[in-house]
Image (tube, rainbow, N blue to C red):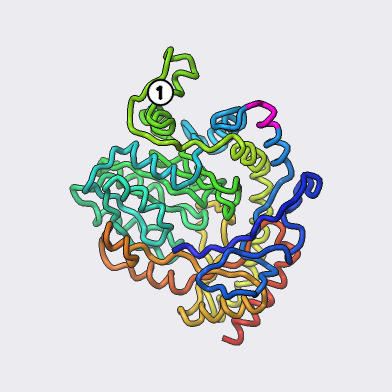
Amino acid sequence: MHPTTSGAIAKVSHEKYGHHANLLDTPATCQPVASATDTPNIPMTIPFNRPYLVGRELDYIAQAHANGQLSGDGVFTRRCHAWLEQRIGTRKALLTHSCTAALEMAAILLDLQPGDEVIMPSFTFVSTANAFVLRGAVPVFVDIRPDTLNIDEVLIEQAITPHTRAICVVHYAGVACEMDAIMAIAARHGLKVIEDAAQGILSSYKGRPLGSIGDLAALSFHETKNVISGEGGALLINDPALIERAEVIREKGTNRSKFFRGQVDKYTWVDIGSSYLPSELIAAFLAAQLEEAEGITARRLAIWDRYHTWAAPLQRSGTLRRPIVPDHCMHNAHMYFLLLRDLDVRTHFIDAMKVANIGTVFHYIPLHSSPAGQRYGRAAATLPHTEATSDRLVRLPLWVGLEDQQDHVMQAAQHILELT
């Protein structure tokens, strides 16, 4: 279950928006996708999410059409690959049609077999587990830390068995997991590390960009993320031994990439794979976004900082707990969440904010307690922090363009919390 709400995309002409303009001009045009907490006929004048356009997306899509290539791996795809490789420092970046697809490629690259185990948090989106389950592997769920809500690195080693093949970490809210400790555990036990950095673009751990530390990493460019292409993702490959096979898997199991580089005179089927390429139209949209990624992040951080300052006295009074970002982690303001006292308070808060026409949402239902999680995976031990966090966490609106409405969000939230 993933009850994220988002603004619906309205029809706009190329002339309607300019540089740094938002796709939706007025709050009244925005109707979020229904979630488990929604009721009909209540307009969200301040939605939980609203996709942001930098202003060059349609121009670049038109250029892709003029170039005569709409299928994948054209000029704009190569431009995105270069940006990711240079900015993140990964050995090889490959755009995919989703972060889910990137995780599925990672599972194939690791040659996971039925019965192999992958250690991961339960507090994550279903794709993190599903990618490995599709290969017959077993997700082994470990509890999260109560501070960052990331996988508790102290609990990983005791979850390792003779069947363990990999550790998949999730950088929750763009805040890094404790990667030094996790990489050391993996080295001691001969395990691979996959970073689910879906939320982590332009975040870092001790100065190292997220996605550049594990053997493999996956990014998301879904419309709810900081940098977007509607749907989309990328596989980041830091182990050079995996690069050539990754290209084959992404190209339906063929050596087509070698053919286009002139390394073979024809291409053929050489391995398993699938069609993981996004179209050049998606890459063109993404290229425009990546060019403004630093500015987007700066604006989101300013919104995040205002929330954090506002929530400080509420934390001191015991009303809530704010996010915790360790000093050695630089985050990207992917989300701002509050941890409320219990499920009843959280439910009341979401309902009351809805009455105020403000979209707020909870997040993950723990995978270990879901029907598929119980069927395909197992919990390494009890997961008390995962379960408590799932009941208490609520996310506030955070999107570029919210600045003029943020005071209203904070005032409404404070009024509701003071009456709770």
Q: Position of residue 402 (x, y in %)?
A: 70, 62
Residue 220 seen by the camera: yes
- Relative to 295, say whether 301 is above or below: below
Extent of the magenta region: 63-68
Q: Looking at the image, which residue is at 26% across and 44% down? A: 165
Furthest toward the right, the residue is: 15
Q: Looking at the image, which residue is at 47% across and 43% down? A: 211
Quarter of the image that includes the C terminus: bottom right
Q: Is residue 302 magenta?
A: no
Based on the displayed image, in which of its 4 quarters is residue 214 positioned?
top left
The number of numbered discs placed on residues in the rendered structure image is: 1
Q: Position of residue 173 (x, y in %)?
A: 51, 57
Q: Position of residue 372 (x, y in %)?
A: 32, 61
Q: Looking at the image, which residue is at 61% across and 32% down? A: 76
Query: For the residue marked with disc 1, what is the amino acid?
Result: Asn
Based on the displayed image, in which of its 4 quarters is residue 313 positioned?
bottom right
Left or right of 37 in this view: 24 = right
Main SS of the magenta segment? helix
Furthest toward the top, the residue is: 265
Residue 322 seen by the camera: no
- Relative to 35, say whether 334 is above or below: above
Q: Looking at the image, which residue is at 74% across and 44% down? A: 55
Q: According to the image, label 1 marks what residue?
A: 255
Residues packed near mark 1 inside 10 Å, few (<14), some (14 to 19) or many (20 plus): many
Quarter of the image that includes the N terminus: bottom left
Q: Position of residue 306 (x, y in %)?
A: 67, 65
Circle 1 — which element? loop
Furthest toward the bottom, the residue is: 419
Depth order, front residue of 376/383:
376
- Relative to 196, say whether 67 is above or below: above
